[in-house]
Structure formats: C-alpha cells, structure tokens
Amino acid sequence: MMKSIKWLLLISYVLFYETFVNAQDRPIPVFPASSFNKDQADDMLNNGTAILQGVVVKKKKNPDNTYLGIIITLFPCTSYFDEWYELNKKNKKGKTLAMMSPEAYSYRIVTKASDKDGTFVFRNLRPGKYYLQTMVRQGKMHEMWNQVGTSMSVGYNIYGQAVTSYSRPIYEDFKLFYETDDLVKTLVEVTSEGQIVNVKL
C-alpha cells in the first residue's frame, strides 16, 4: 500500500513538474492597453480614393520561384495597431506574444498576388499609414558532402613489411532541396487622396 502511494506521489510530482516547465516555456500573450477604434479603422479602409499597388519581389537566388497562392494582408495603422506593433517589436526573446482582439484583427484587407509576376493592389484607401505582410515560400538548395566509406593505405619498407597504415574518408556530394516560409513585412504611408503608392515586398 505504501509503495502504491509513493508511486502515485512520484507520478503526480512528475506531471506537475512537466506542466510547470512547459508553462514557463510558453510565451505570455500581451494585448494593447488602448481600446480599438473600429470607426477609425473602417474609415481608413473604405472611404478613400488612394491606391496601394505593389509586387512581391522574387529572390535572386531562386529565379524560378512562382507566386502561386501568395496572400498579402493589409492592416490600417490605427493607434491600437501602433501599440500592437510596438509590443511585437519588443518580443525579441520570444517571452511574450503580441495579440490583437478578434475585432481589431477582423479590420484587415486580404488579397492574392498575381501568379505570373507577383503584383497586387489595394483600393479605396484614405491617407494614413498601413502595414503589409505576406509569407513567401522559397525553394532552396544546399550542396553537402556525405561520408560513404573509407579507404585504407599501407606503406611497406624494402623488406615488404607493412610499416605505416592510414585510412582516408570517401565522400560523396549530394544536393539537399528544401522549402522555407519567410515573413515579409513593411509599413507604407498614403499622404493624399487619389494618390497611387508603389511598394515592394
């Protein structure tokens, strides 16, 4: 009976310790202290005449990359968003995670880049600052060497006796192909109505 109790206590301690350690490793979610102004966000996104047009730039190391399925997201830089952006910049060690309220996150525009040349456009914007981001999938290649065996060399003296021996590694080269998802982001400012702003991501 005492053994069973000890085992139960030990298991309980292990489970508690693992839960505590995992909780310590998780980033702490933080939200902007200010309230979200939906009227300001709605006004910036729907009542203007400015156009923001751009292109997702191909990486020089991968000229054959396509733009299939690349999504660009635009957020209006309201005071609430600016506070979130500053919280996000402070998260260098991954201890905190900047979060938006569901309502604030819903005030965004999503568009798809052209598969042919990566162009995109946002219309009906008012003067102000906007934040754009996208995830770019890149195909990459890394050349590597892999040891596949060894060769033995033996040195003999004039009497035919082996006096030295050493082994040399045999390498084979191969190419490793993989993909990466890179977050690309930028801040853009519209200064006047009817303006056409060009941007590269």
Image (cartoon, grey):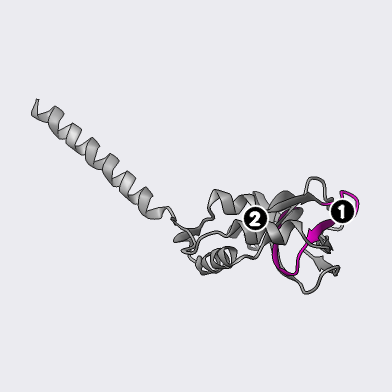
**Residue sitting at the far right:** 116
Residue 3 falls left or right of residue 195 = left
**Residue 114 located within the stretch drawn in magenta:** yes
Instruction: Name the image quarter holding residue 6.
Output: top left
Residue 26 in percent (x, y) is at 42, 52
Examine the rendered structure and indicate whether residue 95 appears above or below residue 148: below
Residue 126 in percent (x, y) is at 76, 65
Residue 169 numbered tag: 2
Examine the rendered structure and indicate whether residue 140 appears above or below residue 192: above
Instruction: Name the image quarter holding residue 1.
Output: top left
Q: Which quadrant would the C terminus be assigned to in this image?
A: bottom right
**Residue sitting at the far top:** 1
Looking at the rendered structure, the kind of residue marked 2 is Pro
Residue 170 falls left or right of residue 99 = right
**Residue 4 located within the stretch drawn in magenta:** no
Q: Residue at x 46, y 63 (%)?
A: 33
Q: Residue at x 84, y 56 (%)?
A: 120
Nearer the observer, 129 or 19: 129
Q: Which residues are magenta?
A: 113-137
Looking at the rendered structure, the kind of residue marked 1 is Asp
